[in-house]
Image (tube, grey):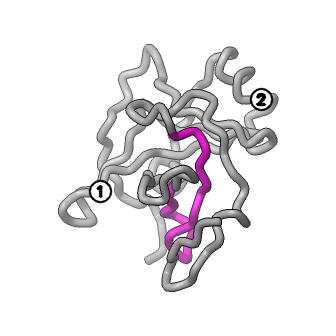
């Protein structure tokens, strides 16, 4: 059982559904099980927190609020590996790199994290043949303050 502080509230990560990365996140071969922890009250910013090392986390956002036209296409092999049958079965998240100031944050559009909501299998998928940026400026599109 791991307790993490989130907005001053302790969360038992054992109470959160674990995500199983079928392919480890590049650079972190020993970390395959993560939980998704909401970091703000609007649900815009989350952290993928490793269950093996609570100090390891990746900031992620749903692309909807920031890149409304973002629609990555997954190849059949990835869909099968994760257990995605319909588009509605996939949760797409973008890894965020924070900047010195809030306005300097960027999101990786080239390699989204894809989670199969039904199986809870996940992978960071590099979109081959795409010219999407690795560091797209993160500016909310119509997100209320």
In the picture provided, is 143 more to the left or to the right than 97? right
Q: Residue at x 35, y 57 (%)?
A: 139
Q: Residue at x 69, y 51 (%)?
A: 18
For label 1, the residue is 98
Q: Which residues are magenta?
A: 31-48
Q: Quadrant of the C terminus?
A: bottom left
Whole-percent x and y of residue 24? 52, 32
Circle 2 crowding by C-alpha within 10 Å: few under 14, some 14–19, many from 20: some
Whole-percent x and y of residue 23? 57, 27
Q: Secondary structure at mark 2?
A: loop
Whole-percent x and y of residue 10? 58, 80
Residue 35 occupies quadrant: bottom right
Q: How far apart in space, not on screen, are marks 1 and 2 (Cα)?
A: 31 Å
Determine the residue located farthest toward the bottom in the rendered image: 8
Instruction: State the residue in front, 81 or 102.
Output: 81
Q: Earlier in the sequence, mark 1 or mark 2?
A: 2
Instruction: State the residue in front, 57 or 45.
Output: 57
Q: Quadrant of the N terminus?
A: bottom right
* Residue 47 lies within the magenta run: yes
* Residue 5 lies within the magenta run: no
Above or below for 63 versus 83: below
Above or below for 52 versus 21: below
In the picture provided, is 20 more to the left or to the right than 50? right
Badge 1 vs badge 2, beta-carbon distance below 8 Å: no
For label 2, the residue is 83
Q: Secondary structure at mark 1?
A: loop
Residue 109 occupies quadrant: top left
Instruction: State the residue in front, 69 or 118.
Output: 118
Whole-percent x and y of residue 118? 81, 42
In the picture provided, is 129 more to the left or to the right than 119? left
């Amino acid at each position: 059982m791991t307790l993490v502080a989130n907005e001053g509230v302790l969360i038992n990560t054992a109470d959160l559904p674990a995500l199983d990365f079928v392919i480890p996140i590049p650079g972190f071969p020993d970390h395959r099980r993560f939980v998704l922890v909401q970091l703000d009250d609007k649900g815009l910013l989350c952290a993928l927190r490793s269950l093996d090392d609570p100090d390891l986390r990746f900031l992620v956002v749903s692309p909807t609020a920031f890149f409304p036209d973002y629609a990555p296409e997954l190849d059949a092999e990835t869909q099968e590996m994760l257990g995605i049958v319909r588009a509605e079965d996939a949760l797409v998240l973008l890894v965020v790199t924070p900047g010195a100031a809030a306005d300097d944050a960027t999101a990786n559009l080239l390699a989204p994290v894809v989670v199969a909501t039904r199986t809870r299998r996940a992978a960071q998928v590099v979109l081959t043949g795409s010219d999407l940026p690795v560091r797209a400026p993160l500016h909310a599109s119509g997100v209320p303050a």
